[in-house]
Image (spheres, grey):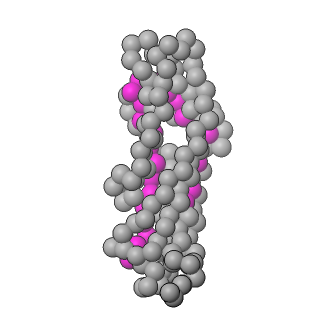
Amino acid sequence: MNKMSIQFLDMRISQDSVVDTPGINLVRSGAIFGDIGLQTSNVTPANASLVRVTLNAYVRLSVDVSVIVQNDVTFSVYRNNTLIFSTTYPGNINNTVTQYEMVGITAVDFPPASDVLTGQIQYTILASAIRTATLGARSFSGIAVAGNG
């Protein structure tokens, strides 16, 4: 078996806010808090179908009291506007005070060679809430490598 070495392609960060205030209020809406373009133009032809991406996000989340409906907050990651990962933080309808949480997310992607060969892959992360929540400090980062070593 002929193994190729791992080829580093790119690493990007999106630091939307380094402090909790002022936050982004989510009131039955969504907000993009991370947007990166990972460069893939230097991928070797033999590695175009062997690209792997690791994405990491952090957000300090505060979820307001909701007496009518559970206050879920959903985090969605997109590759070139195609959903590749989604997870929901379940709010607690029994809470009587605002909840403060540190949310860490890791998503991985195996982009198709057709996306890799365009030279750049755009990744975005969006947070949305059913009722009311606030995003404090937040960041998003990604690393792309290729090969099967």
Rendered residue at 53%/56% (across/down): 55
Residue 4 vs 63, above or below: the answer is: below
Residue 22 vs 14, above or below: the answer is: above
Rendered residue at 54%/46% (across/down): 105
Q: Residue furthest front?
A: 1
Left or right of 83? Residue 23 is right
Q: Which region shows up in magenta?
A: 115-142
Q: Position of residue 28 (x, y in %)?
A: 38, 28
Magenta segment includes 99: no
Q: Position of residue 20 (x, y in %)?
A: 63, 34
Magenta segment includes 122: yes
Between 122 and 84, the one lying in front of the other is 84
Q: Quadrant of the C terminus?
A: bottom right
Q: Position of residue 63 (x, y in %)?
A: 52, 25
Rendered residue at 50%/64% (across/down): 53
Number of numbered markers: 0
Rendered residue at 61%/26% (across/down): 100
Between 140 and 104, the one lying in front of the other is 104
Left or right of 103? Residue 44 is left
Q: Position of residue 54 (x, y in %)?
A: 53, 60
Main SS, magenta residues: strand
- Choose top left, top right, bottom left or bottom right for residue 11: bottom right
Residue 41 vs 17, above or below: the answer is: below
Q: Residue furthest bottom?
A: 2
Q: Is residue 26 visible?
A: no
- Choose top left, top right, bottom left or bottom right for residue 7: bottom right
Q: Is residue 98 visible?
A: yes
Left or right of 96? Residue 69 is left
